[in-house]
Image (cartoon, rainbow, N blue to C red):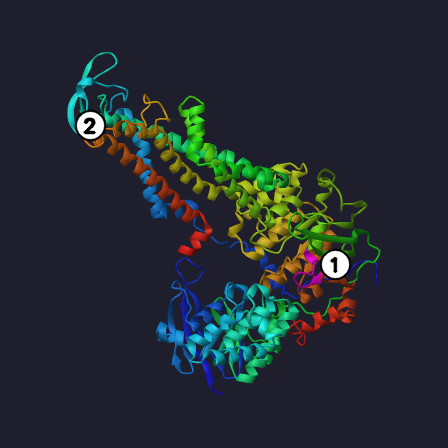
Amino acid sequence: MAAAPSRRPDAGAALSDEAYEALSVESATVVQRTSVWSRLARNWSVRIGGVLLALLVLIALAAPVLGTVDPALFDPGSRDLLPGAAGEIMTLEGETLKHTFLMGSDSFGRDIYSRVLYGARVSLVVGIACALLSITLGVLAGLSAGYIRWLDGPMMRVMDGLMAIPGILIAIALVTLWRASLLTVVIAIAIPEIPRVTRLVRSLVLSIREEPYVEAAISLGTPRYRIMFGHILPNTIAPLIVQGTYIAASAILVEAILSFLGVGLPSEIPTWGNIMAEGRVQFQQFPHNVLFPGIFLAVCVLAVNILGDGLRDTLDPKMAKRAG
Amino acid sequence: MSAILEIRNLSIGLPAGGDRALAVRNVNLTVGAGEIVCLVGESGSGKSVIAQAVMGLLPRQLPVRSGEIRLQGEDLLAATPQRLRELRCVRMSMIFQEPMTALNPVMRCGAQIDEVLRTHTDLDPAARRARIRSIIEEVHLPDPDRIIASYPHQLSGGQRQRIMIAMALVLEPALLIADEPTTALDVTTQAQILKLVKELQTKHGTGVLFITHDFGVVAEIADRVAVLRLGDMVEARAKDDLLSAPEHAYTRMLIASVPSIVPRHRGADAEAPVVLATEGLSKVYSSGGFLAARHEVRAASDVTLQIRRGQTLGIVGESGSGKSTVARCIARLIDPTTGVVRLGDDDIAKMGVRQLQPLRRRVQVIFQDPYRSLNPRRTVGESIIEGPMNYGTSRDEAMDRANRLMELVRLDPKALDRYPHQFSGGQRQRICIARALAMEPELLIADEAVSALDVSVQAQVLRLLDEIRDRLNLAMLFITHDLRVAAQVCDHVAVMSKGQVVEYGPAAQVFGAPTHPYTQALFAAAPGRDYAFGG
């Protein structure tokens, strides 16, 4: 054979030249898909959960202007008022204000309405902070367990150990170990959630790391940390958002439980849990002490969970296929 | 010849927002007794929708808009679900592409066939057992007692497909619908299954509607052929007429796109520098160890190959032959167990990550699945510039190069800021080629890079690869299971079986006069080799 390879213009499989030339204009036709946002906006669970949650956030932010008084104020003259009753309350400066107790008052003469509205702040902050904290730590643990082979065993055994202890027990132990404050409560609630996030992320990483685009990145010489954070992490976001909503809902509940048991935030800081705890003894005569914070707690947890379900249905391609 | 299946003016709708209003439009088709009609089309042509319509399996989103479907004169579109259940298996049956998912994994094969008999006949258990045995013998499965007692996962793909066929034909239906029944099978298994379908069809006088995308299979099995294109039937004629003198331009294009099995002669420079050579390359997977018994699998053993600049080496083999393992060892996506992988002057087989880093760019891979080889959350531009930027190219310079490469792979450079899901499979595969070329590699590995593509798109990508190899003077390692593709692109061919290279030589020699029995069997099984495809 001659030294120089021959160059045939008609090389390759027999494909007509017109068809081949047509390739250059082909890119004009692209598939258009509806964006994630518009799909989210069409989902009823997302709509209902989102609106309820937005309302709660609004209430929590606007608590000072919604006809409330300082939630720490009490007036022995206005003890155990029924919802809607008018009474008086003394400010810190010693003035006496006329005040309508929309949700009644407790046995110290504090305004339940004000306490519940301010309590929403604590619950929402705890929910969001716990979700963010446990997801951040869980993602770091899960990514390293999934991508760094030798770390997998030790890391997951530690997580198994954490999972073997009931979450609420760990939280109680941690809070009693430290002084109860917003920060310690958030950390105590977030830690038991970490193993679940770690397991989720690890299993996602194990399947994503086998995807051809990750192998392509390896052969493109992309360093390992950039493969982990640039290729693998972004593709775990959707399930993580869903998991985050569930963690938030459960954190709000756990915070209420801790407060109810008396190991949570001190009673100067009103939370739905400690309002209910204080109303518990008088529940038979004055159910409103427990009822109103209970309703808010239920609606809040429900809203977050509904939102989570909607997000899962829209973001998870498997669920979307089943629905469509 | 009486018609078993008659489809008249059938139109089936698509959900709103699709690329067209109707999945199939005004389709007319008849299948006579003892006749095999092939329904051919590329993906999205609506061929499977027709099969589903006949079986009464259409999903609710695809309503029949007009037309009629008659099975031996009975109107199927007017039939109640109850009546359709009575007809299925008794008078019409279907076999599917993926025998593993079509069989129930937790039921023994015998019990699955028995279920058909119990549902549709009044036979007593002894008669049913006898019938199951005889049908299993009829589909040529060895050792019927063992097969009856086996679960699907204990059988091979070909055996599972035989069970499917046994189940479909046990009640001797008048019509058999086969939806890509051999697409998931190896070529030698495919040849056996095709032979079996033909044999049983002749014996029972069954009418067969055979759906396929593969013209080789058509040439092997069809009596008549109907060609579908985006829901329209463009041509329906006797096989020989259609294959030898296609009338419609689309049919002509499809047939011309099928690569010829006769290797193309190409002057290969025997003195060109060797880009890559492997010596005694082996990969052993071992499992178990601590508690379980140690279990070793030799995925590749003692593979010795070399590729020169400007030339293409093809590795041909069936699934499990180890061809992809070799490619992945060469690209160092997995670590070889023993042997030498010489890239230029460097042995990269045992190199550590740091040593390997500067050499990585010289070997680039194009993967099989175009839908999974691009990160869905990055624009194609970002994907293409990633590699060069890893090696210190500035963003602007890399973007510049990406623009030129998009033109080289014949895509609009304006599409660089789009996301992968906005492109078709063939377009994505061209983007993957651009991404690999951005590294200016010396060796391009195409691991089944055209296997997932429709035949016309496949022809485009093959031609593009060919053009690029010539223009950039690259060495190429081409992994494929498809002999036709290998014949068209390869200068040298290595045939692999069970982890070993059984035959290795210039393409013309291997294709012209195969010496190893396995190679000979492989060629004998290639469907449609009696027809000259490729225009």
Disc 2: which residue: A104
Give the SS element for disc 2. loop
Name the residue type under label 2. Answer: Gly
Disc 1: which residue: B313
Q: Output the chain of dot 1.
A: B
Q: Which mark is residue B494?
A: none
Label 1 near label 2: C-beta < 8 Å? no
Q: Nearer the viewer, residue A13 or A262?
A: A262
**Distance of mark 2 from mark 1, alpha carbons?**
85 Å
Q: Write the residue at 43% across / 59% down.
A: B18
Task: Judge whether residue A19 is colored magenta.
Answer: no
Picture coordinates of residue A183 (x, y %)? 43, 25
Q: Nearer the viewer, residue B35 or A263?
A: A263
Q: Output the chain of dot 2.
A: A
Position of A202 relative to B521 (above/below): above
Neighbour class for label 2 at 10 Å: few (<14), some, many (≥20)? many
Neighbour class for label 1 at 10 Å: few (<14), some, many (≥20)? many
Name the residue type under label 1. Answer: Leu
Give the SS element for disc 1. strand
Picture coordinates of residue B284 (x, y %)? 72, 53
